[in-house]
Image (cartoon, grey):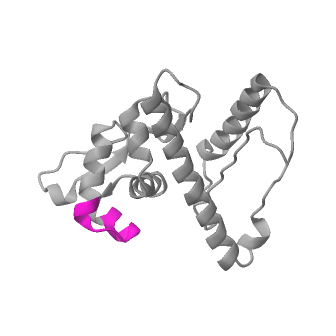
Amino acid sequence: MRDGETGDVRQLDDVQALASLAHPDRSRLLDALTVHGPSTTTELAQALGLATGSVSHHLKVMVDAGLVEPAETESDRRKRRWRLVTRGLRWQSGGDASRPAAETAGTAADLMLLRRDTERAQRFLDAAGPPWSDAAFAAHVWLRLDPAELEEFGRELEALLLRWRRREIPDDGTERAAVLAFARAFPTEP
């Protein structure tokens, strides 16, 4: 799937897919496939420090959930590559009392990703040096919005992030790193 193609960001409402996302190793596998592209089970295991058998199991679960698929057919199964079905995912956490299992799975996936994002930010702050420490940023902004405005804000922010992800990366010899950009916006009190 190339960035910008129809379906490169998928709305999840399937309980099995949401439950799959709530597992930290599966989430890491999805991140690795996003950053590195199609990869073998062995490559993924080495990159993430996981056992090959564990990676195989998680990939099977994610195939069944419709999140990953074989990238190509090869006669040697050890060289089979896996790829994402879509480059991006979005879902609603909570808010659907008529589907309690989906609500629970969505909230679990959201909380697990928030923990991982916070841990990654902490590791960066503990170890970063110039030029990345100078380039990285944090924003802390209070807004006053109604639910429709919050939805519009979210769509605009997502569009900005996707525009940067989908841009043509110049072949100018500059070394570029994988950069995680995450944002959250929700009503709360100070």
Tell me if residue 28 can be seen. Answer: yes
Quadrant holding the N terminus = top left
Q: Nearer the viewer, residue 150 or 171?
A: 150
What residue is rendered at 66% in x and 50% in y? 182
144 or 172, nearer to the observer: 144
Q: Quadrant of residue 121?
A: bottom right
Q: Which residue, as the protein is rendered here, is positioned at the far left?
A: 75
Q: Position of residue 156 (x, y in %)?
A: 73, 33
Which residue occupies the foreground of this view, 37 or 167? 37
Using residue 129 as the reference point, say whether residue 83 is left or right of it: left
Residue at coordinates 83% horizontally, 44% vertically from top-left? 189
Q: Is residue 50 magenta?
A: yes
How many numbered dots are placed on residues in this image?
Answer: 0
Q: Quadrant of residue 63?
A: top left
159, above or below 132, in the image? above
Residue shown at 81%/26% (left/top)? 146
Give the camera-side residue of 108 and 74: 108
Left or right: 56 as drawn, with respect to 91: left
Q: Is residue 176 visible?
A: no
- Residue at (81, 54) in percent of width and height: 139
Q: Which contiguous range is marked in magenta?
A: 43-54
Q: Is residue 152 left or right of residue 171?
A: right
Say whether residue 44 is magenta.
yes
User: Magenta region, mostly helix, strand or loop?
Assistant: helix
Q: In the image, residue 166 lies at what x, y percent?
A: 59, 42
Left or right of residue 41, residue 5 in this image: right
